Image (spheres, rainbow, N blue to C red):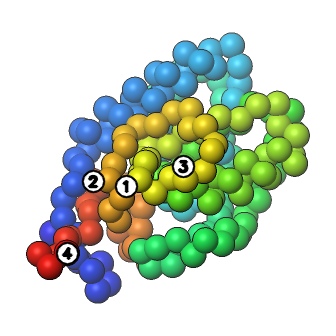
Amino acid sequence: MVKLHDLEFEPYLDQQTLQKSVKQLAERISKDYESKTPVFLGILNGAFMFLSDLMKQYEGDCEISFTKLASYEGTSSTGEVTTLLGAGNLKGKDVIVVEDIVDTGNTLEHIVGVLKKEGVASYKIATLFLKPEAYKKSLSLDYVGLEIPNKFIVGYGLDYNGLGRNISEIYQLKSNLND
């Protein structure tokens, strides 16, 4: 059990499960981009651990860039996406957007709009986690590590109000018996 601020979280996914999924994604992306030099665009803050491990497994030339967006307050999405840090010049490049988790899809919709305006050669989306129940957008998700239920999770880069990113496993919000 882990307590962050006012909430308790229980173990959900261990390191081995996470690393197996990351390795499988890296193998697929390496194969798809073997003759290209993609730019991996990490969405901060959440994707930093996933992107780091993905890069260790990726075989081939690549570049790395980051953008920082905000859309969460507490345990839920605000519905508004704010750009806090831009990604730099991506015009004409093959971009792989690296997300920690896709739930509503609001952040992805925002970043894809930015990429189209930038004039990227192509883009694909890689996410470690997908919450299919929450995802209502029409964007194609090209690389999905694990589909999970629509529960709030922390660890491995994901946080609750700033805490929990440094936990190496994934914990889910403890469910109350009254739920």
Mark 3: few/some/many CA within 10 Å (<14, 14-19, 20+) = many
Instruction: Give the mark nearer the N terminus: 2 vs 3.
Output: 3
Could you tell me if residue 97 is visible in this image? Answer: no
Which residue corresponds to the image point at 41% horizontal and 53% vertical from the top-left?
Answer: 133
Q: Choose the circle earlier in sequence order: 2 or 1.
A: 1
Q: Amino acid at mark 1?
A: Tyr
Q: Is residue 116 left or right of residue 2?
A: right
The circle on residue 169 is 2
The CA distance from mark 3 to mark 1 is: 12 Å
Marks 2 and 1 sit apart, C-alpha to C-alpha, by 6 Å
Coordinates of residue 104 in the picture (x, y in percent): 53, 59
**Are discs 2 and 1 less than 8 Å apart at CB?**
yes
Q: Which mark is residue 179?
A: 4
Residue positioned most to the bottom: 6
Task: Give the SS element for disc 1.
Answer: loop
Q: Does 140 sit left or right of 159 as displayed?
A: right
Q: Residues within 10 Å of mark 1 (few under 14, many from 20)?
A: many
Q: Does the CB distance between marks 4 and 2 fall below 8 Å?
A: no
Residue 13 marker: none
Mark closer to the observer (1, 4): 4
Viewer-nearest of discs 2 and 3: 3
Which amino acid, mark 2? Glu
Above or below: residue 80 compared with residue 134: below
